[in-house]
Amino acid sequence: MKRILLLTLIVILTVTLNVEFAKAHTAIESSTPSDGAVLEESPNEIEIAFNTAVAEQSIAELISEENGNEIEIRTEVNDDKMLITVPETLQNGVYRVSWKIIGADGHPIEDSIGFTIQNQETSDNESSDEQISNETIEDVIEEDNQTEESSDTSNATIILAFSIVLFLALIAGLILFIKKKRNSP
Ligand SMILES: [Cu+2]
């Protein structure tokens, strides 16, 4: 009975530690538009929601992937949200919003999302341009996914390795403890 209780405790401890470990850094939770979205109209506002509050000195920038130009924006931080106002009407193309935030644990974090504007009314007149921009969109999205996947995988590997080592150490300790108890008179 005691052994079952101890094992349960170990499992709970391992799970709890993993959760703490995984949520250590501040990260994006959602955004409007979402990453990879295709919009028919230029957005007036972009909202990035994080999983914790972010520092007020956090910054963001909006870049046109077509020509690398930076588009003027206004950024406002409100607790766990970043509100970006886009005063100008964006032309058809691929855009990237990048941010440098300071998370709840004081760590600086850099990340970005991409979105595409594809207004049919304006793109019908320039179908050859659309062809080029579609290729760019796919390249950009693919590139972005690869980066995210590799960092996700390495995080998962660290967490898995960490929990296996912890679990084995605790089991070893438990066995030694039980053996010692049995041997003692
Ligand atoms: Cu952190």
Image: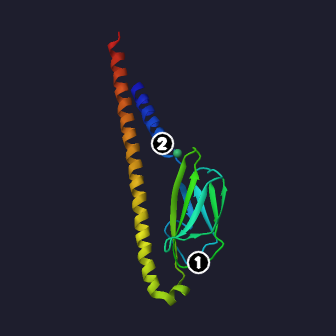
Q: Is residue 16 above or below residue 103?
A: above
The percent position of residue 111, horizontal first and vertical second, equals 51, 57
Residue at point 45% right, 40% down? 15
Secondary structure beneath label 1: loop
Quadrant in which the C terminus is drawn = top left
Q: Identify the amino acid type marked 2.
A: Phe
How many neighbours does mark 1 have within 10 angstroms: few (below 14), some (14-19), or many (20 or more)? Answer: some
Q: Are marks 2 and 1 in contact (CB under 8 Å)?
A: no
Disc ID at residue 21: 2
Quadrant in which the N terminus is drawn = top left
Question: 53 and 147: which one is in front?
Answer: 147
Q: Is residue 12 above or below residue 130?
A: above
How many neighbours does mark 2 have within 10 angstroms: few (below 14), some (14-19), or many (20 or more)? Answer: some
Q: Is mark 2 within 8 Å of ligand 1?
A: no
Question: Which quarter of the figure has residue 33?
Answer: bottom right
Question: 18 and 114: which one is in front?
Answer: 114
Q: Identify the amino acid type marked 1.
A: Glu
The percent position of residue 137, horizontal first and vertical second, equals 44, 73
Residue at point 40% right, 70% down? 139
Question: 22 and 150: which one is in front?
Answer: 150
The percent position of residue 154, horizontal first and vertical second, equals 39, 49
Q: Which residue is mark 1?
A: 41
